[in-house]
Amino acid sequence: MDKQQRDTLQYLRKVADRFGYLLNPDEKALDRISRSLTENKVKYGKYYCPCKRHYPLDIKIDPLCPCKTFKDEIAQNGHCECHIFFSAEAAEQFSRKEGLLATVTCPG
């Protein structure tokens, strides 16, 4: 893992801590998603949401991570659409059903 991706994970941890969430307990999935975020940061200068972005990315309308709806998504589903941020309950449930979300892929 390079420094840029470590910086991305540090950013995600700060966001999770600030709002009382946990990061995806599936390390492989979190690695895949954080790589997409890192690529967006390197290429476009900001952490554009990897799952809600247009292709090609449109900096005028594409959301930054965390997006405006991530809290509502977590309240409704236990995790945000990108599967980055989880409620404590959803993370615990996921840990008991190891690999359940590993098949979910982000288009980013």
Image (cartoon, rainbow, N blue to C red):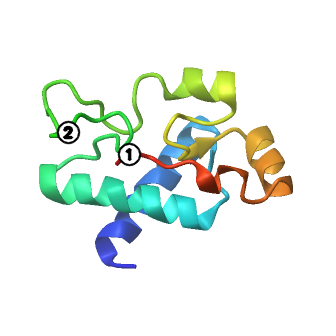
Q: Are marks 1 and 2 in contact (CB under 8 Å)?
A: yes
- Amino acid on which the number 1 mark rests in the picture: Pro
In the rendered structure, find residue 27 and report the number of the disc placed on it. Answer: none
Quote the CA–CA distance across marks 1 and 2: 10 Å
- Measured from the top left, where is residue 71 in percent x and y? 55, 26
Element under disc 2: loop
Q: Quadrant of residue 62?
A: top left
- Measured from the top left, where is residue 14 in percent x and y? 49, 50
Extreme-front residue of the structure? 103
Extreme-bottom residue of the structure? 1
Q: Is any atom of residue 24 visible in this view?
A: no
Whether residue 73 sits left or right of residue 66 in the image: it is right
Q: Residues within 10 Å of mark 2 (few under 14, many from 20)?
A: few
Q: Residues within 10 Å of mark 1 (few under 14, many from 20)?
A: few
Q: Quadrant of residue 43?
A: bottom left
- Residue assigned mark 2: 55
Callout count: 2
Q: Quadrant of residue 77?
A: top right
Asked if residue 25 is positioned above or below residue 91 in the image, the reply reads below
- Residue assigned mark 1: 107
- Amino acid on which the number 2 mark rests in the picture: Tyr
Whether residue 14 sits left or right of residue 36 in the image: it is right
Q: Which residue shows up at 41% across the image and 36% down it?
A: 66
Q: Which residue shows up at 62% across the image and 36% down it?
A: 79
Asked if residue 53 is positioned above or below residue 93 in the image, the reply reads above
- Measured from the top left, where is residue 91 in percent x and y? 74, 48
Q: Which residue shows up at 41% across the image and 54% down it?
A: 11
**Of callouts 1 and 2, the N-terminal one:** 2
- Measured from the top left, where is residue 30 in percent x and y? 53, 59
Whether residue 67 sits left or right of residue 47 in the image: it is right
Q: Which residue shows up at 40% across the image and 30% down it?
A: 67
Q: Is any atom of residue 12 visible in this view?
A: yes
